[in-house]
Image: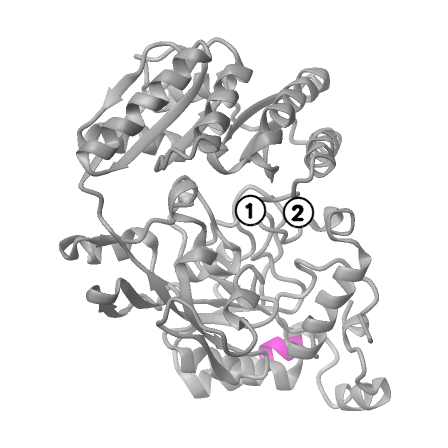
Amino acid sequence: MLYALIGSQDLKAFMTDQASLPLHPAARAQHVLSLLAAEIGNKISTNPSVCEAHSHGEALEIANMPVGVVFAESTQDVSTTLTLCHSHRVPVVAFGAGTSVEGHVTPPDGAISLDLSRMTEVLEVNASDLDCRVQAGVTRQALNAFLRDTGLFFPVDPGGEATLGGMCATRASGTAAVRYGTIKENVLGLTVVMANGEIIQTGGRVRKSSTGYDLTALFIGSEGTLGIITEIQLRLHGQPEQLSAAVCQFETLDDAVNTAVEIIQMGIPIARVELLDDVQMQACIRYSSLEEYRPLTTLFFEFAGSPEAVKEQISVTESLARDNNGLAFTWADTADERARLWKARHNAYWAVKAQHPGQRLISTDCIVPISQLTTLISGVKEDILASGLYAAILGHVGDGNFHTLIVTEETEAGRQQALALDRKIVARALSLGGSSSGEHGVGLGKLEFLAAEHGEGALSVMRALKATLDPRNILNPGKLLPIGPVFKG
C-alpha cells in the first residue's frame, strides 16, 4: 500500500533515503521513541499491559501491539511526535478512548500509538455565541458537566465514553442526530497536526463562510489518515425547557419501523427515536432490569422544547403509533427515569454480549434513505432467520441508521458465518441507495465495501488526497482506503 500511495514521488530517491534508516520497522519505532524521550520527557510507555490496551478498539477483535505509546498533553507534543515519525517513516495511530468498533485504532507492525486522552482542557466557552473550544481528549460527558451551569449543552451522543477528537475522526452520530445532526454539523473548526508535524487551523467561529476549501469537513471522518485533530471548535445548543421520554411497544417489527418513518416524514422535531427489536429488547430487559416491559419490538422516544411544543409532538406521535398498532405509551418524565432508559439503550451491546458469554459478537451498521428503512429492516430480519444465527437489531431509525449485533461461535468458521450475514445486510442497504456505514466508519472492518459504494474513480481521488497530505503513509496506514490506483488527472 505504501508504494501505491507515493504517487508522483520519485521511487528511486525514496528508496535511497529509506536505506539510511533501520531496516526493521520496530527498530525504527524504538529509535523514534528514544528521540522523543529527550523531547517530551516521561510521556512514553513500552509497558506490555499499556501496549496491549492500545492494540485494539471495541467489537472488531483484530489486535496488534504497538512498539510504544506516546501520551500527548498538547498540540506541540503531537507535532513533535509526528515530525520525528515522518522523518523516520514510523507509522502512527491516534488513540482516544478506544471505543471505535471497526478496527480504527489497531496499529500496523512497527507503529507508535499516539494517545490523546490526556488532552482534556476546555479551552474556552463563548456562551453568547453558543460555541466552545476543547482539546481532543475531552469527552462529551465531561464537556456537558463543565457546561451544566451555562444553560448550554453539546448534543452529539454516540453512547460510550468517546473523546471528541475520536468522534470527529470517525464522523460520529448517535441517538440525538435526528434533531441536532451528527458531529459534522456541530464542528466549526479544528486544529490539525499534519503528517510532517506542521500545525494548521481550519474553519473558525462563524456559522458559515464562503472562503477556500472546506478543510474542516475534509478531516471530519478521515479516521486519522490525513492529519491528527488536537483541538475542536464546537457548536453548542440551549438546554430545552422541557424533556419528556416515552416507550411504545409493538407486536410487529414493521409497525414500529413504519411509525418512526412517518414521524420523520411528517416533520415532527423529535429529539430521539430509537428502535430495539424483540431480540434486543429481551436482552435489555435482563441486563438493565427493565422488567416492566415485554420482549417486543420497542421504540424509545424523547421530546424536547417548550411545554406547548412538547405537548404537540407527543400528541401527533401517539396518534401515529396508535395508527400503526402501537401499544400504550409508558412515560419517563423524571431525569432519573430518562437516564435509566437511555443507559439501557447505550448498554445494548453489552446486554447481548452478557447473554452469550464466551461467544463472538460482531457489531455492524448501515443506513438508507428513510423511505427505504422498512424494506431494509424487514429484509435483514429475514436474512437473520435464514442464517440460523442469534442477532439483534437496534438503531437510530429517525435518520435511517440501524445496527445488527451478530453472535456466533468463537471460531474461524463462526466468524465467516457472521461476516456472510453482514455482507448480505450491507448488500441490501447499497441496493436501496444506502451506505455501508452510517456512523461506525470504515477502519479495517468496512474496507471491502468501499469500491461497491463509491466506485473506483472516487476512491482513486481519495487516494490522491492521502498521497498528497501523507506522502510517506505514516498516518493510520491500511485504514479507510482499500489498495488501488491513485488519481493522476
Task: Tell me the quarter of the picture where residue 87 sits.
Answer: bottom right
Q: Amino acid at mark 1?
A: His
Instruction: Give how far across and how far down residue 227 sits, in percent.
Output: 55, 72
- Residue 433 falls left or right of residue 310: right
Against 256, is 122 above or below? below
Res 351 seen here: no
State the SS at label 1: loop
* CA distance for labels 2 and 1: 10 Å
Instruction: Give how far across and how far down residue 215 sits, in percent.
Output: 54, 72
Instruction: Give how far across and how far down residue 144 sits, in percent.
Output: 25, 53
Against 463, is 255 above or below? above
Say which residue appears at 75% left-offset and 80% top-offset. 23
Q: Nearer the viewer, mark 2 or mark 1?
A: 1
Q: Residue furthest right?
A: 12
Q: Amino acid at mark 2?
A: Gly
Seen from the viewer's position, the closer of residues 273 and 48 is 273
User: Is residue 69 magenta-colored?
Assistant: no
* Sequence-first disc among 2 and 1: 1
State the SS at label 2: loop
In the rendered structure, find residue 445 and report the number of the disc placed on it.
Answer: 2
Q: Quadrant of the C terminus?
A: bottom right
Please name the predominant secondary structure of the magenta segment in the image. helix
Instruction: Give how far across and how far down residue 171 sits, in percent.
Output: 51, 55
- Tell me the magenta residue range: 27-31
Evaluate if marks 2 and 1 touch, with contact meaning CB atoms under 8 Å apart. yes
Task: Tell me the quarter of the picture where residue 91 sits.
Answer: bottom right
Task: Tell me the quarter of the picture where residue 427 sits.
Answer: top right
- Residue 437 falls left or right of residue 1: left
Res 121 seen here: yes
Q: Quadrant of the N terminus?
A: bottom right
Reading the image, the residue beneath label 1 is 440
